[in-house]
Image (spheres, grey):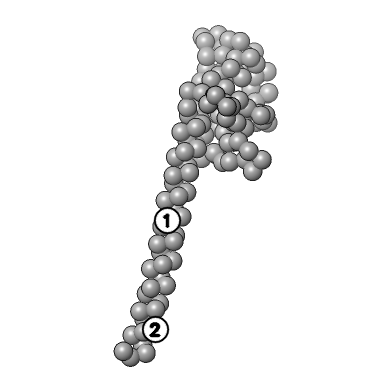
């Protein structure tokens, strides 16, 4: 077999292996993202968000409440290196008003938040709307 054919075959094999590796990594990343979305949008996680919000604003999710709705910012999901899943919960559809939770799974399958972080605009929003 001529040397040029061997080199081409070798280069093609290397390119194929790299392509398979990159494709496998992309599939793994997609599966991890889906798992994070599943956790963040679960009923157990939603209970953490709702309980937290209602403790801060008793009228939340009612006609008289300041906070009317929330949604999970799926683009912001990431694992915390110290444990848990970081979840940003956007309030009333306003991207600049959010609460970030660090969800940690309990032994019974429920979740709790190790801590939370409010956006800089959150307090202003709550005070302004009162």
Q: According to the image, label 2 marks what residue?
A: 7
Residue 55 can be seen in this image: yes
Horizontal and vertical percent position of residue 91? 55, 25
- Give x and y (percent) for residue 83: 63, 38
The answer to whether one can see residue 96 in this image is no
- When asked about the image quadrant of residue 116, the answer is top right
Q: How many marks?
A: 2
Point 53% across, 26% down: residue: 109
Q: Residue at x 64, y 43 (%)?
A: 81
Q: Residue at x 68, y 18 (%)?
A: 127
The quadrant where residue 50 appears: top right
Q: Secondary structure at mark 2?
A: helix
- Residue named by callout 1: 24
Q: Residues within 10 Å of mark 1 (few under 14, many from 20)?
A: few
Is the residue 24 above or below the residue 95 in the image?
A: below
**Rendered view: 8 above or below 94:** below
Q: Which circle's residue, 2 or 1, is located before the other in the chain?
A: 2
Instruction: Determine the residue located farthest toward the front in the rendered image.
Output: 107
The residue depicted at 44 percent of the width and 60 percent of the height is: 22
Q: Quadrant of the C terminus?
A: top right
Q: x%, y% of residue 42? A: 47, 27
């Amino acid at each position: 077999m001529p040397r040029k054919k061997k080199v081409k075959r070798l280069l093609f094999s290397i390119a194929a292996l790299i392509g398979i590796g990159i494709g496998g990594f992309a599939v793994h990343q997609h599966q991890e993202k889906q798992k994070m979305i599943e956790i963040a949008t679960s009923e157990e996680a939603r209970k953490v968000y709702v309980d937290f919000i209602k403790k801060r604003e008793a009228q939340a999710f009612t006609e008289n409440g300041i906070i009317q709705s929330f949604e999970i910012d799926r683009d912001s999901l990431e694992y915390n290196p110290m444990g848990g899943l970081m979840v940003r919960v956007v309030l009333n559809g306003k991207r600049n008003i959010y609460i970030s939770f660090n969800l940690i799974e309990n032994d019974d399958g429920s979740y709790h938040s190790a801590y939370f972080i409010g956006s800089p605009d959150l307090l202003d929003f709550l005070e302004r709307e009162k």
